[in-house]
Image: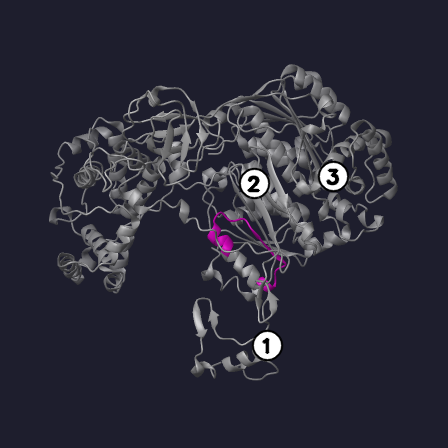
């Protein structure tokens, strides 16, 4: 869903070499294998040592002293059965590299980088260097003399419905105002379905100049025919060619540095020299600088100054060089996750030609994670533990503090899996006093496997939280973790109550919807707990941290109603495939889930009819009418089938109703030549004029609808069906389809507002009489005893044998045919109708890495807002914005300043005395804070608003 079929096909022919199987190398390999290339070869000559376990998640203590590549092979191979994974334990050489289309070096010397970089550039092999040292990271790409990018950003081509086109030089196109057209100056577009000015439909891509949110100018249209109506304008994506320098040349070109934190421009320019100096240091000393050694740091800075004699940077960041030297022996899982996510994304670009590659250097640091006070060199000595790579950066006392943490992780999906991996590696909650609680109500689906790397095919249908917890315990047996399957909402406050939250050090949100994030944020503000929050959408991602009293909270949900599809558009005026797919989903839910659920409620709940009547006459008519027809046999005028033949008959009649009768009724109310009150064509802009369909038993899509609908209808009544089209066609020959005549009395609403107003009106006498009739029909007790319960269907997109997606695709594409909307294939339909939030392993790894860097700061108790970072990234186009979080907004009450974090602590019952009355509480606040309370609420409930009689209540 992120890369598309064409890019995936190109990737499936690529052979990739990843050299170095320490933490960074295995992170890149994991992400590349999940993305689906042809083969991955992992190379490493080295044996596993204690520091590797700090970030190499496929190594265990039993692997110490064994080859890293060999030990990782089985786990890497299990990630994706479609990718051939092999290990190479010998040294790198020219002959080996020439077998691959993409080569990635990690943990390599500068000499090797230069030599193999030259070789790859010469032979057209895409070459990537990735490296991390402590809290700093480096990434380099060389994709050759001429690399073609087929799609720069991976976004869907923008498109818009046309309202009008002028005959002018240049011609001006006005788009329908249902949303911004989304084009830019210089965009190239094509036209289709234009009536009148048909010349536009046959010319090639046209360059545009944007005039406003809904208009743009094009070529000279003065000689074209007069525009009449309709038309769609669609962006035409243009390929581009990029050229790269080999590493030896690129080392000298500071213009090739891509910035990611604009407060650190000088630092990253300095790091470009410092990483080169570090290679020289290792070559001379045969070791990395010692942790927190001032003499080694001074030696490294002298080397940087020497390199700067050629580079001639105006300013060197000495503190950055010093901290790089202090922490260079460190190996941190969050930094490897971030750089590894970015590097793997570059591999995907190299293989697929999709997205814009890095040109050509990127440096990253999180040195603000370091302790605010400098520590003694002795506290960083290794202890022969799995955390040695982390202790080299932060010291042993901090490690012990990490292990004592109690954290609550909400969500065990893509980001949740990556966070748990990082938690296990850094030892969060892994001590005697520590603990992790993870909750996720979902079960593993097949579509999860390409990005939620803790899950395997044998885990499908199992709870995500349970499987994820088990997987990370295998990574780090010291992990103390409990898995729940609870939804986080007000209903679960009996579990996640005040005492639960007060026992926590912090919360991490790995959620896929805004509402749940807002709720969790409210709880954290209320109970003064820090929150880490992250999310992804394809190649885009964000990470932020909420710190009590220091940063602003996540805040109220940004309304997504702007993106909601109006009901009248779904019902009568669709103009995009998203509209027909949402309509098909609504049909599925109404026919196969909601109606059977209502029937079952009626059968077991005596108050169902009365409760439904209380929801308004219009809704009661629809619900009770559906219940009665589902209970009454077809022969008696209802809709209840007694045989498979009845199910086929129902499906055929439903087809006629949806794709012929309803459309004929719509065109009866609004004929094709209808004009608006202002004299403009009614069917123009975003209103596409539909046409009815005629059922053809030999039309594949027509039959697919009938087969799927009949089988699903049978399922809700416990009747077995078949896929045998020949036998179904035979039944169809006997089906009587009632004739239909459009009615002039039918009112079709043009806007959602009209629909709401109609609902609020009192029902007419005919509706009231129909309701009374339904109440009478549903009253006999014999109806409940003789009627059989129904079997509601929950939509499941990933089971190809259950008819669910068969129905959605056929129902949507038939409606699309009604309205001349281009159809969508099964894959596209599944993504939209299944409400799949596109995710990719690279982005989730990078975002989780950034979140865990903020975790380091929280655990240390950093109190400077300048230490924290809010990050927004788009790996498709190398867009990185890391900035300081915002402070909480202040508001003033009675001359004092407060923020949302402030509260009034009240001891309601002290020294064994009686609990406070409401009056006592008001007096306490008045005396202690000099505030007079005029209104008091509990959630939405009013406790006090001048109610004198309530003051004595406790």
Closer to us: mark 1 or mark 2?
1
For the question of whether residue 777 can be seen, the reply is yes
User: Residue 645's x, y, as percent?
Assistant: 18, 38
Mark toward the start of the polypeptide (2 vs 3): 3
Question: In the image, 640: left or right of 859?
Answer: left
Say which residue appears at 34% left-offset and 39% top-offset.
Answer: 579
For the residues labelled 2 and 3, the Cα–Cα distance comes to 27 Å
Left or right of residue 887: residue 82: left
Q: Nearer the viewer, residue 78 or 868?
A: 868
Label 2, secondary structure: give it.
helix
Examine the rendered structure and indicate whether residue 235 appears above or below residue 739: above
- Taking depth in this image into account, of 798 and 346 the one nearest to the observer is 346
Q: Mark number for residue 430?
A: none
Residue 844 tag number: 2
Q: Compare marks 1 and 2 and give the one earlier in the sequence.
A: 2
Which residue shows up at 38% across the image and 46% down it? 564
User: Which x, y percent locates residue 921?
Assistant: 54, 79
* Residue at the spot of label 1: 930
**Residue 802 visible in image:** no
Q: Which residue is mark 3?
A: 267
Left or right placement of residue 780 versus residue 938 in this view: left
**Highlighted range, magenta:** 501-518
Dot 2, crowdedness within 10 Å: few (<14), some or many (≥20)? many
Tell us which disc is closer to us: 2 or 3: 3
């Amino acid at each position: 869903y992120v890369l598309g079929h064409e890019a995936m096909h190109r990737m499936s022919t690529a052979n990739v070499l990843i050299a170095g199987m320490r933490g960074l190398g295995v992170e890149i390999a994991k992400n590349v294998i999940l993305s689906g290339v042809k083969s991955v070869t992992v190379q490493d000559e080295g044996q596993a040592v204690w520091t590797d376990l700090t970030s190499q998640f496929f190594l265990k203590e039993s692997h110490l002293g064994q080859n890293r590549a060999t030990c990782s092979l089985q786990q890497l191979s299990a990630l994706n059965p479609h990718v051939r994974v092999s290990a190479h334990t010998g040294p790198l050489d020219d002959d080996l590299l020439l077998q691959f289309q993409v080569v990635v070096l990690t943990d390599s010397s500068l000499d090797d980088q230069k030599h193999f970089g030259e070789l790859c550039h010469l032979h057209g092999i895409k070459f990537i260097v990735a490296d991390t040292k402590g809290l700093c990271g480096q990434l380099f790409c060389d994709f050759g003399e001429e690399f073609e990018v087929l799609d720069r950003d991976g976004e869907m081509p923008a498109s818009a419905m046309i309202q009008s086109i002028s005959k002018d030089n240049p011609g001006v196109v006005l788009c329908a105002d249902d949303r911004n057209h989304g084009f830019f100056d210089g965009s190239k577009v094509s036209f289709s379905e234009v009536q009148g000015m048909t010349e536009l439909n046959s010319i090639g891509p046209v360059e545009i100049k944007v005039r406003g949110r809904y208009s743009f100018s094009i070529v000279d249209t003065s000689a074209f025919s007069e525009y009449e109506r309709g038309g769609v304008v669609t962006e035409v994506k243009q390929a581009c060619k990029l050229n790269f320098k080999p590493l030896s040349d690129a080392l000298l070109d500071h213009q090739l540095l891509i910035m990611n934190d604009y407060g650190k421009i000088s630092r990253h320019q300095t790091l470009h020299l410092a990483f080169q100096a570090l290679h020289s240091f290792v070559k001379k000393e045969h070791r990395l600088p010692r942790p927190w050694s001032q003499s080694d740091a001074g030696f490294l800075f002298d080397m940087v100054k020497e390199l700067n004699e050629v580079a001639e940077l105006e300013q060197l960041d000495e503190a950055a060089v010093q901290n790089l030297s202090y922490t260079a022996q460190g190996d941190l899982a969050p930094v490897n996750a971030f750089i590894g996510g970015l590097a793997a994304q570059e591999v995907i670009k190299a293989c697929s030609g999709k997205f814009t590659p890095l040109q050509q250097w990127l440096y990253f640091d999180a040195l603000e994670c370091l302790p605010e006070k400098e520590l003694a060199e002795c506290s960083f000595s290794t202890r022969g533990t799995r955390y040695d790579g982390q202790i080299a950066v932060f010291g042993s006392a901090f490690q012990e503090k990490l292990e004592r943490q109690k954290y609550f992780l909400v969500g065990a999906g893509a980001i949740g899996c990556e966070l748990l991996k990082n938690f296990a590696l850094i030892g969060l909650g892994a001590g005697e006093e520590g603990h992790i609680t993870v909750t996720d109500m979902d079960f593993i689906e097949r579509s999860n496997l390409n990005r939620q790397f803790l899950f395997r095919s044998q885990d499908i249908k199992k709870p995500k939280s349970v499987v994820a917890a088990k997987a990370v315990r295998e990574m780090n047996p010291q992990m103390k973790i409990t898995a729940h399957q609870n939804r986080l909402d007000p209903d679960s406050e009996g579990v996640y109550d005040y005492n639960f939250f007060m026992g926590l050090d912090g919360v991490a949100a790995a959620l896929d919807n805004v509402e749940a994030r807002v709720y969790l944020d409210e709880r954290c503000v209320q109970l003064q707990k820090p929150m880490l929050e992250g999310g992804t959408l394809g190649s885009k991602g964000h990470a932020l941290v909420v710190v009590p009293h220091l940063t602003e909270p996540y805040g109220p949900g940004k309304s997504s109603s702007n993106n909601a599809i109006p009901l009248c558009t779904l019902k009568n005026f669709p103009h995009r495939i998203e509209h027909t797919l949402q309509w098909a989903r609504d049909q599925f839910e109404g026919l196969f889930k909601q109606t059977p659920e209502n029937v079952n409620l009626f059968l077991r709940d005596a108050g169902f009819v009365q409760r439904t009547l209380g929801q308004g006459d219009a809704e009661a008519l629809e619900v009770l009418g559906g219940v009665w027809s589902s209970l009454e046999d077809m022969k008696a005028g209802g809709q209840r089938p007694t045989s498979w033949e009845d199910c086929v008959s129902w499906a055929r009649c439903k087809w006629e109703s949806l794709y012929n009768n309803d459309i004929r009724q719509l065109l009866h109310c609004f004929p094709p030549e209808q004009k608006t009150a202002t004299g403009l064509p009614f069917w123009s802009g975003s209103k596409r004029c539909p046409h009815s369909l005629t059922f053809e038993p030999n039309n594949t899509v027509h039959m697919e609808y009938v087969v799927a609908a009949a089988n699903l209808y049978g399922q809700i009544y416990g009747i077995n069906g078949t896929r045998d089209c020949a036998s179904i066609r035979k039944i169809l020959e006997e089906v009587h389809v009632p004739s239909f005549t459009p009615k002039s009395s039918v009112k079709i609403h043009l806007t959602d507002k009209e629909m709401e107003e109609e609902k609020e009106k009192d029902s007419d006498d005919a509706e009231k009489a129909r309701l009374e009739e339904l109440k009478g029909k549903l009253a006999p007790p014999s109806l409940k005893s003789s009627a059989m319960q129904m079997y509601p269907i929950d939509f499941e997109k990933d089971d190809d044998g259950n008819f669910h997606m068969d129905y959605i695709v056929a129902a949507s594409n038939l409606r699309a045919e009604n309205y001349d909307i281009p159809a969508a294939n099964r894959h596209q339909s599944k993504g939209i109708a299944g409400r799949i939030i596109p995710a990719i392993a690279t982005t989730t790894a990078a975002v989780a890495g950034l979140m865990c860097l903020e975790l380091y700061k929280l655990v240390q108790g950093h109190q400077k807002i300048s230490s924290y970072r809010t990050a927004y990234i788009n790996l498709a186009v190398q867009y990185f914005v890391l900035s300081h979080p915002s402070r909480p907004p202040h508001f003033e009450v009675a001359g004092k300043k407060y923020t949302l974090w402030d509260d009034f602590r009240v001891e309601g019952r002290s020294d064994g005395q009686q609990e406070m009355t409401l009056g006592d509480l008001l007096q306490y606040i008045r005396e202690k804070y000099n505030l007079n309370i005029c209104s008091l609420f509990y959630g939405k409930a009013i406790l006090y608003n001048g109610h004198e009689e309530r003051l004595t209540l406790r």
